[in-house]
Image (spheres, rainbow, N blue to C red):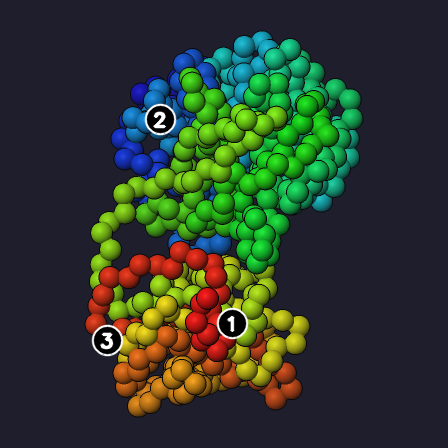
Amino acid sequence: MSLICVLPLLMACAQAQEWETVQSPGNPILADGKDYSTDPAPLVANGKLYILTGRDTAAPGVNDFIMPEWQMLETEDPASGVWRHNPHFVRPEAVFKWATPARAYAGQIVQGPDKRYYMYAPIIEADSKNKDPFAIGVAVSDSPEGPWTDAHPSGPIVSQSYPVKNEIENIDPTVLVDDDGRVYFYWGTFGRLKGVELEQDMVTFKGQPVDVHGLKGFFEAPWFFKRNGTYYMMYAGNTAGPDSECTEAVYYACQAYGTASSPLGPWTYQGVLLDPVSSTTSHGGIVQYKDKWYLAYHTADAKGGDHFRRSVAIDEVKWDDSVTPALIEKVIPTHLPAPAPLPTRNIAPAARIVASNSPVPVQYWIRALNDGKVHENPLPPDTWGTWSPNNPAQQWVVYQWEQKLKFNGSRIRFWNDQPAGSGVGVAAPKAWRLEYWNEQKWVPVSNVSAYGTSTDAFNDVSFDIVETRCLRAVFDASTDGKSYAAVAAQEWEALYPKPVLVEPADTKLPASPVCAATE
């Protein structure tokens, strides 16, 4: 419904209550690219499941969190796919007079001991004198659907200068009202997490905040909840590396968790419950609704989605109650039914990969080379890159298949942040070439059309047909005569002579630099 604005209702009118019904066939819930939703915070109230979300409005290719307002989703049955959606739930400046417009980051709504609803909202404080202007405000309402008023009109309940000084970025609040009515509040990001008890007014610190330790790889996005007497803290972790259980690339995050026997810890790390998703950020919330538990999280899987155009998904959570404390089984994300694959000449997705700089530095991701994705403005893990303090004159990357296949072409999409001829940063290679393994040595392909080095489009190469298990691309680095630039590529395609159906490799096992057979 639409509210008719009259003077007494100006505040409610600023908090648009325009609900629409959405039939969602699967994840993400809003998949058509009309409204991007992010940072989900589930809430059970009035027999319904609500999900408070942010709104991503960044244009394609804009790498920034443009988030002007919050949205709300609501359902009586997640399995039905029927949701009510309020795309313009509330804006920061509509509630908090001390807030700057926009930057409606990850918030959470909880029901307080007084049965009213409290919305914890990280926003930017206007005219802040703090080094970091982010602060957390609290709004209050008699209904989870609003309208909302400022529960602490004098300003934020926490900032870098209030109520006690801190040096962290004050975002990502999470709140639990315990079984005995006591209230606990955690917040933090960039590896810093703080916790404190709140007074019954839901806005005043009760005692001094504690710094949280013991949560391996904590980066951001804490979510605090309780089950069967055990306290759980889920969070976005980014312990990165080739053998990490969390993420290979540092820009990506997993959802990890820890447990505690008391609300302010100490905390014990328990593992990963959600692997990295298609967006670099990972933010989730877990809640029990009726007789099931659910994880709400976001991905980049909606139409036109990307790292800054994310969309909320929801999946069921299963528990291992054979141990104490009970552990969370890893959640396997579900997706909309995929369209039937089309034949393609590019059979690179079926290959294993190895590079001259393997294991690849954690800011890059070697499997970006054959994931089929090209971004208008890629982040580092959208590429394979070779940057190091001392870049060598030559680099290479190898694709390996399990059997001999025929090839007569290739395409590669380079990325750069420095011009050709540079000896620093990342630049298109001075030259490059393709080689194939003839079961004894690497041999250049013959009758080559051209080896382009554009960074604005794919560089297409055709050559005489070869039959091999391995292709190698060799890059002569850009140089200013004194040092060498790094090489980076978003995608490298290996082309079969005619279109075929391709099944992507399902292994992280690397290729062999000399095309040795897998044992």
Q: Which residue is mark 2?
A: 78
The residue lying at 34 percent from left, 41 percent from top is 335
Q: Quadrant of residue 393?
A: bottom right
Marking on residue 164: none
**Amino acid bearing label 1:** Ala
Q: CA distance from mark 3 to mark 1?
A: 25 Å
**Amino acid bearing label 3:** Pro
Q: CA distance from mark 2 to mark 3?
A: 46 Å
Marking on residue 355: 1
Q: Is residue 210 above or below residue 406?
A: above
Query: Of residues 16 and 303, which is closer to you in this image?
Result: 303
Query: Of residues 162 and 326, which is closer to you in this image?
Result: 326
Q: Position of residue 168 (x, y in %)?
A: 70, 41
**Amino acid bearing label 2:** Pro
Query: Of residues 272 and 365, which is closer to you in this image?
Result: 272
- For label 2, the SS is helix
Q: Position of residue 310 (x, y in %)?
A: 43, 44
Q: Position of residue 305 (x, y in %)?
A: 38, 49
In the rendered structure, which disc, 2 or 1, sits on the residue that comes first in sequence?
A: 2
Q: CA distance from mark 2 to mark 1?
A: 44 Å
Q: Quadrant of residue 357?
A: bottom right
Q: Which residue is mark 3?
A: 497
- For label 1, the SS is strand
- For label 3, the SS is strand
Crowding at label 3, few (<14), some or many (≥20) Cα neighbours within 10 Å?
A: some
Q: Is residue 43 above or below residue 507?
A: above
